[in-house]
Image (cartoon, helix red, strand yellow):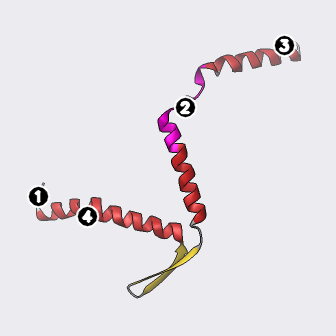
Amino acid sequence: MSYAERMSDISSRSSSSSRGRVPRITPTRVLWVVLAIVALILLLQNSTQTTLQFLGFEITAPLFVIIGACLVIGWLLGEVGPRVWRLRRGDR
């Protein structure tokens, strides 16, 4: 078998095996791509160092880290806190 025949055989096999694997564009995928782009823009625009002063201590960190920490703290207070409170009181 010559080199040209082997190459044509390989290309015909790879094109036939990838025919059924074309990724479909769905609204969910478009939404995730848009959200990822927005998150990247937010990250790049808020990467400046910021000083946070709270109850006598001071932290210097990028703004997006402070925003992320506030989101996590808010989630913990809103979701996990009430569950722990109910468990401690004995309500189920």
Distance from the alpha carbon under mark 4 to that under mark 1:
14 Å
Label 2 packing within 10 angstroms: few (<14), some (14-19), many (20+): few
Tell me the kind of residue under disc 3.
Glu
- Residue at 40% across / 63% down in the picture? 71
- Judging by the rendered image, the residue that carries numbered circle 3 is 5
- Judging by the rendered image, the residue that carries numbered circle 2 is 25
Determine contact: label 4, label 1, CB under 8 Å.
Answer: no
Tell me the kind of residue under disc 1.
Asp
Tell me the kind of residue under disc 4.
Gly
Q: Residue furthest left?
A: 90
- Residue at 47% across / 84% down in the picture? 58
The tag earlier along the polypeptide, 4 or 3, is: 3
- Judging by the rendered image, the residue that carries numbered circle 1 is 91
Tell me the kind of residue under disc 2.
Ile
The tag earlier along the polypeptide, 2 or 1, is: 2
Label 3 packing within 10 angstroms: few (<14), some (14-19), many (20+): few
Q: Residue furthest bottom?
A: 56
Label 4 packing within 10 angstroms: few (<14), some (14-19), many (20+): few
Distance from the alpha carbon under mark 4 to that under mark 2:
39 Å
Q: Position of residue 25 (x, y in %)?
A: 55, 31
User: Element under label 2?
Assistant: loop
Depth check: give the residue in front, 9 or 64.
Answer: 64
User: Element under label 3?
Assistant: helix
User: Element under label 4?
Assistant: helix
- Residue at 88% across / 13% down in the picture? 2
Determine contact: label 4, label 2, CB under 8 Å.
Answer: no
Q: Is residue 56 left or right of residue 92?
A: right
